[in-house]
């Protein structure tokens, strides 16, 4: 049975993109935090001249900011992207037809 998606509810798409962005931001923030924690721990020993002007524990502070900021930023951008994509889909689907999918009953 072939069915067609004619329209997406913009609010539900925005909500899904919000949570996807939140999760992706948390993952990116954790990776960012690990990288900066490692750089903060081992950087001064490997590159003492570069790290001479940087206060101690800056890597840990930047890592903590990354864990908090990345999910917020990704969630906001995901919500905006979801609204834009769903709006464009609804406009284009009205003009050329929606996505057709085949389902098994």
Image (cartoon, rainbow, N blue to C red):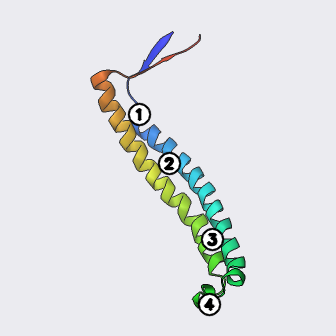
Question: Which of marks 2 and 1 precedes in the sequence?
Answer: 1
Tell me which residue sits at (65%, 60%) in the image. Answer: 31
Nearest-to-viewer mark from 4 and 1 = 4
Looking at the rendered structure, the secondary structure element under dot 2 is: helix
Marks 4/1 in contact by CB < 8 Å: the verdict is no
Image location of residue 90, percent across then percent down: 34, 31
Q: Is residue 103 above or below residue 25?
A: above
Q: CA distance from mark 3 to mark 2?
A: 23 Å
Relative to 8, 42 lies left or right = right
Tell me which residue sits at (62%, 90%) in the image. Answer: 52
In this figure, which residue is indicated by the disc labeled 3? 63
Image location of residue 62, percent across then percent down: 59, 74
Q: Residue 52: give its label.
A: 4
Q: Is residue 58 above or below residue 64?
A: below
- Rendered image quadrant of residue 99: top left
In this figure, which residue is indicated by the disc labeled 1? 9
């Amino acid at each position: 049975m072939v069915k067609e998606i004619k329209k997406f509810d913009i609010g539900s798409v925005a909500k899904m993109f919000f949570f996807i962005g939140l999760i992706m931001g948390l993952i990116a923030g954790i990776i960012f935090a690990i990288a900066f924690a490692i750089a903060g721990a081992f950087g001064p020993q490997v590159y003492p001249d570069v790290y001479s002007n940087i206060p101690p524990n800056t890597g840990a502070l930047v890592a903590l900011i990354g864990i908090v900021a990345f999910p917020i930023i990704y969630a906001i951008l995901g919500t905006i992207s979801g609204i834009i994509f769903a709006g464009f889909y609804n406009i284009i689907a009205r003009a050329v037809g929606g996505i057709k999918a085949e389902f098994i009953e």
